[in-house]
Amino acid sequence: MSTNTNSITVKQATNSRLPDVDFDNLTFGSTFTDHMFMCDFKNGVWQDATVLPYGNLSISPAAKVFHYGQAVFEGMKAFKDENGKVFLFRPEENLERINKSSKRMAIPEFPRDLFFDALHKLLALDKGWIQGGVGNSLYIRPFVMATQVGVSASPADEYKFMILMSPVKAYYTGDVKVVIATKYSRSADGGVGAAKAAGNYGAQFFPTNLAREKGFQQVIWTDSNEHKYLEEAGTMNVFFRINDTLITAPTSDRILDGVTRKSVLALAERDGIKTDVRRLTVTELIEAAKAGTLKEIFGSGTAAVISPVSAFGYNEDVFELEKPSDSFATKFKKELMDIQYNRAEDTFNWRYPIV
Ligand SMILES: *Cc1c(COP(=O)(O)O)cnc(C)c1O
C-alpha cells in the first residue's frame, strides 16, 4: 500500500515482525520497529519524504559519510501511559539540537513540520511496539548522513535524513564506576563537542575500552587543555552533589546541551534544591570526597535517564560513594519518569502527546 499524505509517502509493511519480538530479552538499540523514515536532500531541497518498511539501504561506497564522517544524530524516546496514550518528551529540543549539530557539520537543516509529521506517522504505525509499564519505551534515533558520491574533501550536496525506532527497556543495570580522564579528551574548544556528531562517539571508544580494562565502565571527561575541570560522563552530562548543592558544568563548545540535564536543573529549582552551574575542578571533587561532603555523582541522558556513579578513579586512587538515603539521583529519576509516563502533572509542558 502506498499513500501520499502531507507530502510524506507511506509504504506500509505487509507483515509485522512484532509477534516475533522477545521483549524480555531486548539488547539496547538492536531491535527495530516495522517502519523507518527517510528523506533525501537533493538540488538544495529536502524531498521524497517516505515512511517505509525498516530495511537495508543501498549506498555508494564513495558516499562522503564513509570518508569524512559528515553525520549527526539524536536520541529521544516515546512512552506509553497506563491508558495506552503515547507521549514524546520535549521533542522540540531534539529538533533544535539536530539542526544545531547539522549546522556545525555543514549539513542543511531539516524542516520542523516534516520532522513532526514523520514522528506522528511512524508512531501511528508502530505504537504497538511500545510496551506498557514504567521503564519500557521506544528509543527514537533521527540521524543525517552525507550521501553524495565522491571522495573529494568538501561538504556534500546530497544527504539522507532518517528516523529509526527501537523498543527498549531501562538502559543501565546497576551503578557505574567511572574514571577521570587525565590523557584523552572527547572535545576541545572550537571543536564539535557540543554537536551530536557521529565521530564524537567513535573517538570515545578507545579511551573507554582502556577504562574498561581497569574495571571502570565510563570515563569522566575533563577539559582538553588542562584535564582540570569535570565536564561529562561518557555520553551523559554529569552532576555532582556536594553537601546539598547540585553542581554541573555550564554548556560550552565542549559540552553537549542535554535535554535531561536541563530538565534535572529545572526540577531541582522547582524542588528547592540549590543548583550551581559552574566549572568544578578535579581537586575540589577529591577534597570533597576526602572530607565526606561529596554525596553523589550521577550522569543524565535520554537512554539511561539518570545513572548513579558508585565509585570514581583518579590516577591510582579509587573513591567509593555510598548512596545516601535521600539520593538526588533516585529522586530526579522518579520525577522525570513520572512526567514521561504521565503519572505526574506536567507543569513544565514537557509531554508531547501523539495519539
Ligand atoms: C546525547 C548526549 C548527552 C545527553 O543528552 P540528552 O538530551 O539528555 O539525551 C550528553 N552528553 C553527550 C556527549 C551526548 O551525546
Image: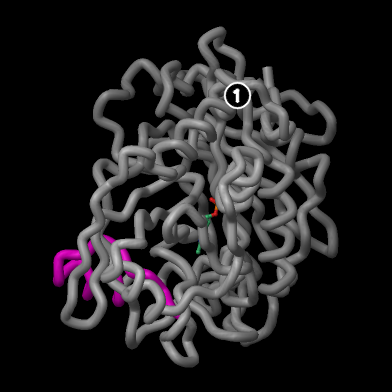
- Residue nearer the viewer, 337 or 192: 337
- Quadrant where the C terminus sits is top right
Residue 92 position (above or below residue 85): below
Percent position of residue 9, x then y = 73, 32
Give the magenta-colored segment's residue range. 206-222
Residue 183 position by quadrant: bottom left
Residue 344 position (above or below residue 244): above
Residue 44 position by quadrant: bottom right
Which residue is drawn at the image coordinates 73% and 44% (left, top)? 92
Q: Residue furthest bottom?
A: 225
Residue 5 is one of the magenta-drawn residues: no
Which residue is drawn at the image coordinates 42% and 81% (left, top)? 185
> Could you classify mark 1 by the number of other residues whose Cα lies within 10 Å: few (under 14), some (14-19), or many (20 or more)?
some
- Residue nearer the viewer, 166 or 336: 336
* Horizontal side of residue 74 vs 310, given as left or right: right
Percent position of residue 22, x then y = 28, 23
Colour pattern of the rendering: one colour
Under circle 1, the secondary element is loop
User: Is residue 44 something that shows in the picture?
Assistant: yes
User: Is residue 53 something that shows in the picture?
Assistant: no
Residue 221 is one of the magenta-drawn residues: yes
Q: What residue type is disc 1 on?
A: Gln
- Quadrant where the N terminus sits is top right
Q: Which residue is mark 1?
A: 12
* Horizontal side of residue 309 vs 211, given as left or right: right
Percent position of residue 37, x then y = 63, 40
Which residue is drawn at the image coordinates 37% and 70% (left, top)? 220
Q: Residue furthest front?
A: 291
Q: Residue furthest top?
A: 83
Percent position of residue 327, x then y = 38, 42
